[in-house]
Structures are given as C-alpha cells and as structure tokens.
Image (cartoon, grey):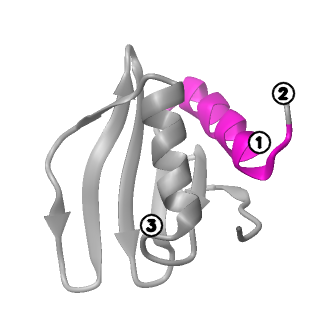
Amino acid sequence: MQKLKIHIAANGHASIDFDEYDSPAWFKAVSILEDEMGFMREGEAVAGMDEGIMPSFVKNDISISAGWDNWSGNYLLSESNEADKVLNQLISQLSGVKQ
C-alpha cells in the first residue's frame, strides 16, 4: 500500500490524496469509515471531464467530502476540526499505527 500523507487544503483543513483512482488504500479507507467508524454516505455523485464529486461521509455533525480528479486520484477532504481528527485517525489505521 502506498505511503499516504495528510496535507492542509485551501479550506484550512486536512485532506488525503490517494494518488490514483480506486486504489486498494481508497477501498480500505472507505471500509474503515463506513464499517468501523460508522459513517454513512450522503449526497450524489457528479462527474466532470477531469474531476468529480462523490457522496460525502457523514456521522453526527462531522462531514468529510470525497471526490476525484486527474491530479489527486481519489481524495478525502475535511470540513471541520473534528473531521481533521477523523482523517488523522484514518491515516494512522491505514499506516498500521495504533493511536
């Protein structure tokens, strides 16, 4: 599995780029968010020529946007400090690091 990193996006919150479409790491992240952390998917998928929006991951007041583009592959984008914490926990799980 590739080495994933969190970076700070233009909105000032955490983002994870998976560097390709539908990578094994992406599917593992989706599984962790839905099956282990209890997030649900909300919203519609919208595809453009070189980018798209996927349903967001939502749990209580926490929302994490999902999408893809030709530069980042699949990505997750935090929308709050609470979601930043979730993405940090997620990256630790994907890396095999216990928190």
Circles 1 and 2 in contact, beta carbons < 8 Å: yes
Taking 87 as reference, is 81 above or below it?
Answer: above
Whether residue 92 appears in magenta in the rendering, the answer is yes
Residue at the farthest top position: 60
Residue stretch rendered in magenta on the structure:
80-97
User: Label 3, label 1: how many angstroms apart (C-alpha)?
Assistant: 18 Å
User: Label 3, label 2: how many angstroms apart (C-alpha)?
Assistant: 25 Å
Under mark 3, the amino acid is: Asn
Query: Which residue is located at x 26 percent, y 60 percent?
Result: 53
Q: Looking at the picture, how far across and down is residue 55, in whole percent?
A: 25, 47
- For label 2, the residue is 99
Taking 16 as reference, is 98 above or below it?
Answer: above
Q: Looking at the picture, how far across and down is residue 16, in whole percent?
A: 59, 57
Under mark 1, the amino acid is: Ser
Query: Which residue is located at x 72 percent, y 40 percent?
Result: 93
The mark found on residue 92 in the picture is 1
- For label 3, the residue is 74
